[in-house]
Amino acid sequence: MRLYIFLLSVLVFTSCHKPKNDAINTFEKVNESMKRSGSLIDDMNSKLCDRIDSAYAVNPSLNSKYYYNRLKADNIGTAFVIYIDSLKLVIEENVGLEKDNISISKKIFIDGGEGAILKAKINYTRDALLSLLDDEDKSKVKSDLFAKDDHHEASITWESELFEHAPIAAVRTLLEKLRNDALNTEAQVLQSLYNRAVN
């Protein structure tokens, strides 16, 4: 999340000193890089699922818990990715010729309430994934998948801070980051399940 906030700050700063397109292009480059990273994490998660499946095939009675939790983790992660993809479609349907139109972000995420829904889904997805692990393994997971209101700014919600004045290029980048955060959290959960299955 720090990277996203930094890039958003850069966008605001550079829009005062450079053409807006330079800052928008920066977000688009980061967005493409995140998509490539997301593909790599997807591949890693598929391999981890295959390994857990193999451990279950060798010893079903011993590894059934890890196998069924692996299925749950995959379903939880997939549901979040599908939701993020649906948000991308909503954005594309609303985008006109002006790529940095901040009114689109406000319309969808603030006025339309999608920001509050996204916040709830982020926190639910993290908690649901972590619930598949024992307490000892939960504490080892380092997840960036969380959405919290700033308790220092009672009047500013998480969604308002991120979407109230954000251009579409920044929102696309944030959605890719959230997708990757979910996949990374799922990867750590799957790795923990696999480690338990083979030890």
Image (spheres, rainbow, N blue to C red):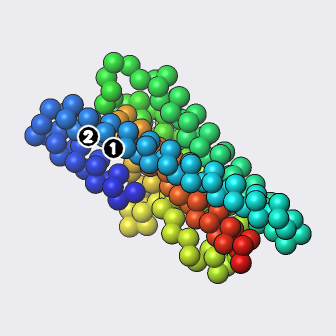
The answer to whether one can see residue 117 in this image is no
Whole-number angstrom distance, CA of label 1 to CA of label 2: 6 Å
Residue neighbourhood size for the residue with mark 2, other residues' Cα within 10 Å, grouped as few (<14), some (14–19), many (≥20): some
User: Who is closer to the viewer here, 14 or 40?
Assistant: 40
Query: Hey, which residue is sitting farthest top in the picture?
Result: 97
User: Residue at left 71%, top 49%?
Assistant: 75
- Residue 65: % across, % down: 81, 67
Q: Are marks 1 and 2 in contact (CB under 8 Å)?
A: yes
93 up-or-down from 79: above or below? above
- Residue 177: % across, % down: 44, 49
User: Who is closer to the viewer here, 74 or 64?
Assistant: 64
- Per the image, label 1 sits on a secondary structure element best described as helix
Q: Is residue 88 left or right of residue 98?
A: right
User: Residue at left 66%, top 72%?
Assistant: 195
User: Residue at left 50%, top 55%?
Assistant: 181
- Residue 184: % across, % down: 53, 58
61 up-or-down from 77: above or below? below
Q: Amino acid under label 1? A: Val
Look at mark 2 in the image and give the residue it sits on: 26
Q: Is residue 178 left or right of residue 4?
A: right
Q: Amino acid under label 2? A: Thr
Look at mark 1 in the image and give the residue it sits on: 30
Q: Quadrant of the C terminus?
A: bottom right
Q: Is residue 35 left or right of residue 192?
A: left
